[in-house]
Image (cartoon, rainbow, N blue to C red):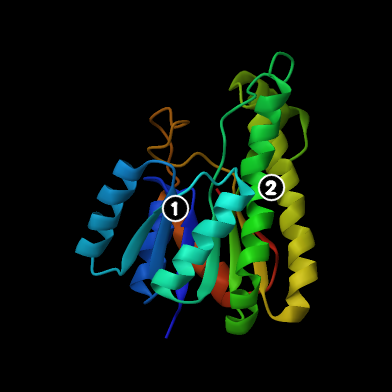
């Protein structure tokens, strides 16, 4: 019987699709975000689909808040088997003018919060031979074309944080594999239909990304897989 999946950075796109897909596999689902009203509606929608879900309000840029939230998840839903990190911060869009506080925030969400979550959930993950699944993005890649898009879209801070997170996934993959814990990233190289970046012509769906996450979780082989 599957355990609990914690979906951090819950929203109406990829993370919702992941919550629904793993919920259909029998996982209890903990959805985590900052907005209580959004969480309440989302939990009700998941319950309507016969998915056992609970909502937890948390600022995932705060490591102490992340640790406290996971303690509450464990008490409410039982041991954590999968940690899904979908959180991001759209700050520091222009690194030339952004404050150092803004730059720190994008790293707090993409790196510091994730590290705290892995550390707190690790005893459960080791016991269940569980997994850490991270939503990556094409902005993490090197190359003039990618950098040009990050500048054009005013998401330079996000690109920087995602690049660091991409490296973090690889390091955790190597470190935790001997402990039976799988760490992997689905790198989204296209624009997801209905997302903020969709000009109306995107064809990649959140459901297809969620399916890639489930396949990655079940296969537990490579650290990275691309979807486009």
Spatial separation of the CA atoms under disc 2 and disc 1? 17 Å
Task: Say which residue appears at 69% left-offset and 47% top-offset.
Answer: 111
> Label 2 belongs to which residue?
111
User: Which quarter of the rendered picture does the N terminus lie within?
Assistant: bottom left
Crowd band around label 2 with a 10 angstrom C-alpha radius: few (<14), some (14–19), many (20+): many
Task: Say which residue appears at 37% left-offset and 37% top-offset.
Answer: 194
> x, y percentage for residue 31?
41, 56
Please state which of residues 210 and 40 is positioned toward the viewer in this rendering: 40
> Label 1 belongs to which residue?
32
Is 175 left or right of 133, judged from the image as shown? Answer: right
Residue lying at the far top of the rendered structure: 97
Task: Say which residue appears at 48% left-offset and 31% top-offset.
Answer: 197
Q: Secondary structure at mark 1?
A: strand
Is 28 left or right of 85, judged from the image as shown? Answer: left
Q: Secondary structure at mark 2?
A: helix
Residue lying at the far left of the rendered structure: 48
Task: Say which residue appears at 61% left-offset and 51% top-offset.
Answer: 64
Q: Is residue 145 above or below residue 138?
A: above
Is 221 left or right of 227, judged from the image as shown? Answer: right
> x, y percentage for residue 24?
34, 71
Q: Is residue 27 above or below residue 53?
A: below
């Amino acid at each position: 019987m599957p355990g609990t999946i914690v979906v951090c950075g819950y929203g109406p796109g990829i993370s919702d699709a992941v919550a629904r897909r793993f919920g259909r596999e029998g996982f209890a689902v903990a959805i985590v975000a900052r907005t209580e009203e959004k969480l309440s509606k989302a939990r009700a929608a998941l319950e309507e689909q016969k998915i056992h879900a609970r909502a937890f309000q948390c600022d995932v840029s705060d490591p102490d808040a992340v640790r406290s939230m996971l303690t509450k998840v464990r008490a409410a839903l039982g041991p954590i088997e999968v940690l899904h990190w979908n959180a991001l911060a759209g700050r520091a869009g222009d690194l030339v003018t952004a404050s150092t506080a803004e730059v720190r925030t994008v790293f707090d969400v993409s790196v510091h919060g994730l590290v705290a979550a892995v550390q707190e959930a690790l005893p459960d993950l080791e016991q269940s031979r569980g997994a850490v699944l991270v939503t990556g993005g094409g902005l993490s890649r090197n190359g003039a074309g990618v950098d040009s898009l990050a500048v054009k879209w005013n998401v330079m801070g996000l690109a920087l944080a995602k690049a660091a997170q991409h490296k973090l996934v690889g390091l955790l993959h190597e470190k935790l594999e001997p402990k039976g814990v799988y760490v992997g990233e689905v790198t989204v190289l296209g624009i997801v239909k209905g997302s903020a970046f969709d000009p109306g012509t995107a064809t990649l769906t959140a459901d297809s990304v969620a399916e890639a996450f489930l396949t990655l979780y079940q296969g537990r082989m490579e650290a990275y897989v691309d979807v486009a």
